[in-house]
Amino acid sequence: MASPTAQQKDLLRAHMKEIRAESAARDPDAADKLAKRFPLKLLDRFGPVVAGYRAINDELDPLPLLNWLRRKGAKIVLPRVESSGEMTFRLHEKPEDLVKGPFGLLQPASDAIEIRPKLVLAPLLAFDARGTRLGYGKGHYDRAIKGLREEGPCFFVGLGYAQQQVDAVPSEPHDIALDWAETPHNSVPLFLAKAAPQNPEN
């Protein structure tokens, strides 16, 4: 039986899928806006290897941003869900090299070069000011980021619409918080909130 927190997440997921679909319909140029305003300082500090993703459903499409980052010298990797369920990040150079993976995703082939990114861009359904990210509930990014950070620094960035920021996302111990969120209209440096004292004195 699912925990109360897991049940709360499922309810929020259903609601946020509708919000995301509405946001996508209202802003057809969102992907280009995101690419134009993405802060280059993140690439300068955490590049050159950047993990992106291929959008499905109503996810904010990162393709214009990834193309722009590539022109700025980034080496782009994409997630691959292995048969074990582990998520790895593998070099992506040409669209025709992608293969069908789980959940309707396009992903690098098994023989693509595996490279560790320090900057990871991820889709989301919702996020809050603490950096709590609501995904699809499979935990792939949580496990992958945890593994990457066991080897060194990794800056975790969520991409979405401004309407996907909510007051609070239910959190579980295994959830990995975002360091930053980027929308077509604003940047949200979430690492600042994480660094602040939880119970500041008056």
Image (cartoon, grey):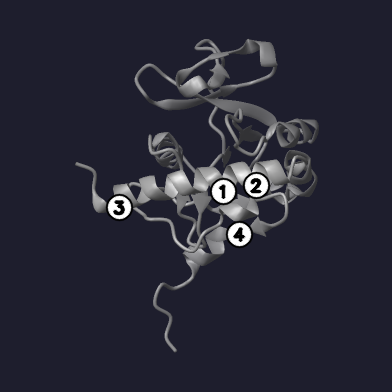
Q: Is residue 122 visible?
A: yes
Q: Helix, strand or loop at disc 2?
A: helix
Find residue 80 and report its horizontal and vertical position in percent: 50, 22
At label 3, the amino acid type is Thr
The residue pinned by badge 2 equals 23
Label 4: how many residues lie within 10 Å, few (<14), some (14-19) or many (20+)?
Answer: some
* Left or right: 142 in relation to 5: right
Mark 1 = which residue?
19
Location of the N terminus (image quadrant): top left
Task: Give the CA separation, mark 2 to mark 4.
Answer: 22 Å
User: Residue tagged by mark 3?
Assistant: 5
Comparing 16 with 81, the one in front is 16
Residue positioned 42% across, 85% down in the render: 201
Q: Quadrant of residue 102?
A: top left
> Which callout, 2 or 4, points to the residue nearer the camera?
2
Mark closer to the observer (2, 3): 2
Contact check, label 4 and label 3, Cβ < 8 Å: no
* Relative image position of residue 197 (x, y in whole percent): 44, 73
Label 2 to label 1: alpha-carbon separation = 6 Å
Q: Nearer the viewer, mark 4 or mark 3?
A: 3
Identify the residue under disc 4.
189
Whichever of labels 3 and 1 marks the residue nearer the N terminus, that label is 3
Q: Earlier in the sequence, mark 1 or mark 4?
A: 1
